[in-house]
């Protein structure tokens, strides 16, 4: 079995730094009301080796520390850590293996994103910040049982079909991806915010759609021009 | 009248530890928005004696300390403590006497769980995390007046009829049970979260039900396989 | 003009203590999401003189201190304080002059209580904790312009007509009263909570009413038996 | 290119003070739930020179400091600061050039204000505090793409057409203005609060309108008589 000692100092240094980043980003899940109790998890893929750092299973958020984060390979095998990794580890690993630009994955059950998913509806694109961040509606993926890589496969299929840069939403869960864990957490926070706003708008009346050419302009500016997003 | 001095050092040590646990779990009720003002209460049954530790009546959450927690026997008589026990004590005691696997009970009036109850509707099972945690819809129990064990009797009947592992909800109150107080508080937080999500989904359109065989698989994995839930 | 120096040491001691109580209770308005920015105010009547202590006008909550609280007589004239009193002072004073058992008054624009009021609907009594605290539906008073005692007159008429022990709600504002300021703040928090829950229930379907004789039993137990409410 | 060294000590002193004010007001956007992640921005125009201080682009709220605030002229050119200014800078600048009484501008995507905007509906005036603060319904402006002064032009047209003293709301964004940045942040918080309340009321039934002459009295008293608003 592979252990962290089999890797060089550059990898071990990145592991240390990414453990701090991933532990700290879990606080943002609580801050922006994306999770309850132990639900939800964040991971980040390393740049220096085919490894990822992910939340341990079942620990309450106030007890998460950098050293409790688990290091796994991209098949989901534990490489370092005293806790068991999240039960969504196989799905995170599947996403990293199949989406080479993705270095951050976040899974939540945030309230309004999940409400749309539970009715099988995509979230319509009626907000400029959806054009900015997602480039279109937030799609709904298929129902899949937890515990294997099946959910990860559903996320990859859904994101590729929709050609959205990040932000997936399938029945009763929400997955977002990004170029690092912070970008994926931001996408998760934005997904819940637009899910809430579009939900509230849907109770008032018809949502005014944004023309696709305007969505494309918004997304292009935000993803390519806007320096520090 | 029985007092704590009639019990041995092992029991007195467990009382001290459980008072800390129960006091601290009340902070979680506030953190996850399950209570307002002095509403809501948590108790835990001891392992070393037929006693339970419960919140005092009418104290504001910021004034709760381990030493203000009240020790009662399983008929609800006070054994130790300078405050009066919660006015729901008889119902907690009834549950412990009739559900021998239960060592934690939580009562709240959390907003969305109570909203479902006030219309007499069970909360439908349209979320994987409901399958995980509850193994089916969250049932609604009968209306009962407070101040005797009648509410506790309603909870026991409702949970046994539904064969759910935890999570009961009857008109204008929510009771959850678990293998300790932390598990029951977790169930209370999950009950409110799924009540909120299913409520929001119900405003969008039809909720897609999860097939019972999938619910059974989710619940079995979560309750039996998932190590640290 | 009367000043605090015209009163004896017992009154000045009560003023000092009530200023601390009233300042500190404003934090509870923020904690339970009852106010935004500078909206909302709390007052308490003294036991030792015909005076009241009330929030200054227009100060942000983080800048409130005991010494910034304003002392007025029961006609709303300032007796001590360097700030102007709340623009609702005349209405608080009117309530104290006409309801001799009332020693605490709270005014908020809390979201869901105000939503019911804006449609002219009373909040139906479908929750045991409404029976406990209010003894019936939360009534809606008449529309009145701010700046005179007109709103206070509307509150007194509404509470007397409904025979509820506390908790009034009229178009676009919420007033609650109690035997001290803390009881009135508690009533304000409970009003918003039941307004939110009954609102959510109304979106699901018909609310199951509680029989009036059960409401009466709940209210009697809570107001007369329950020791520390 | 102009730099801060080209201005005298009075201007440099005001820049220092306004940087503190603007940085600190961003905390209020988080406190009152008006923003998520890096969305939203506050600016204030100087009294001593044709300059403004605005939030840097893309920084998370917990990392904002006075020194990270950017100083721009009223065409949006950077005069001082190591960060890029908000991508809404040109719109803030347009508003200051065309509304000479305005010295504070706030932009958010707050949930319920944006929900009304996404359906093209103005927020009806059914609350006394809307009469106080806004003097009428909150209007909806036109859809405009971000990145130029086009949004600012939409805000100015919308506010002038409606003759409201502050508070504009257009498709998928909310802009508020005031006599300084604090007044504009207050207007943003009030806009979201009344948007939430009027939204909740609209789900219950018909909102009772306030007569225009009463709105005018409320607004006149609040804007002209009420000392410390």
Image: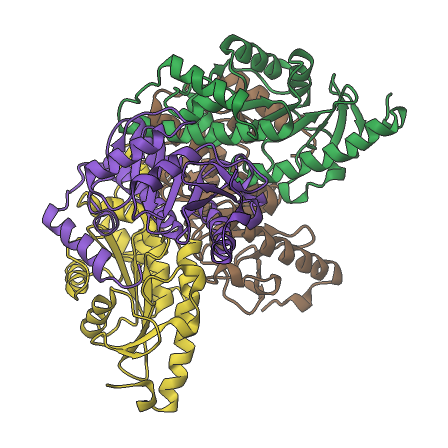
Chain colours: A yellow, B purple, C green, D brown
Q: Residue at x 35, y 15 (%)?
A: C211
Residue B158 vertical position relative to residue D35 in the rendered view, above or below: above
Q: Indicate the quadrant where residue C43 lies.
A: top right
Residue A42 vertical position relative to residue A75 in the rendered view, above or below: above
Q: Answer with left or right where residue C107 lies relative to residue B199.
A: right
Q: At which x and y percent is residue C222?
A: 50, 23
Is B173 in front, or is C1? Answer: B173
Q: Answer with left or right where residue C82 lies relative to residue A186.
A: right
Q: At which x and y percent is residue C161?
A: 52, 8
Q: Residue at x 20, y 36 (%)?
A: B161
Is D34 in front, or is D49? Answer: D34
Is A94 in front, or is A59? Answer: A59
Quadrant (top left, top right, bottom left, bottom right) of the C terminus of chain B: bottom left
Does residue D4 appear in the picture of this structure?
A: yes
Q: At which x and y percent is residue C34?
A: 52, 34
Q: Residue at x 56, y 54 (%)?
A: D74
Q: Answer with left or right where residue D137 lies relative to residue B229.
A: right
Is B222 in front, or is D193? Answer: B222
């Amino acid at each position: 079995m592979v252990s962290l000692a089999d890797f060089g100092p550059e990898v071990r240094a990145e592991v240390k730094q990414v453990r701090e980043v991933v532990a700290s980003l879990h606080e943002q899940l609580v801050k922006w009301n994306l999770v309850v109790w132990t639900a939800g998890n964040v991971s980040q893929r390393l740049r220096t080796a085919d490894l990822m750092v992910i939340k341990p299973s079942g620990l309450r958020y106030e007890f998460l520390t950098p050293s409790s984060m688990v290091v796994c390979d991209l098949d989901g095998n534990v490489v370092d850590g005293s806790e068991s990794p999240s039960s969504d580890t196989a799905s995170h690993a599947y996403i990293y293996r199949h989406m080479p630009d993705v270095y951050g994955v976040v899974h939540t059950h945030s309230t309004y994103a999940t409400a749309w998913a539970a009715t099988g509806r995509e979230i319509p694109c009626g907000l400029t910040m959806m054009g900015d961040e997602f480039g279109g509606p937030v799609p709904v993926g298929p129902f899949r049982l937890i515990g294997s890589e099946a959910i990860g496969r559903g996320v990859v299929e859904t994101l590729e079909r929709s050609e959205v840069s990040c932000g997936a939403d399938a029945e009763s869960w929400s997955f977002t991806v990004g170029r690092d864990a912070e970008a994926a957490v931001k996408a998760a926070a934005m997904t819940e915010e637009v899910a809430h706003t579009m939900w509230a708008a849907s109770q008032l009346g018809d949502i005014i759609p944004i023309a696709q050419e305007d969505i494309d302009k918004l997304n292009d500016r935000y993803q390519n021009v806007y320096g520090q997003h």
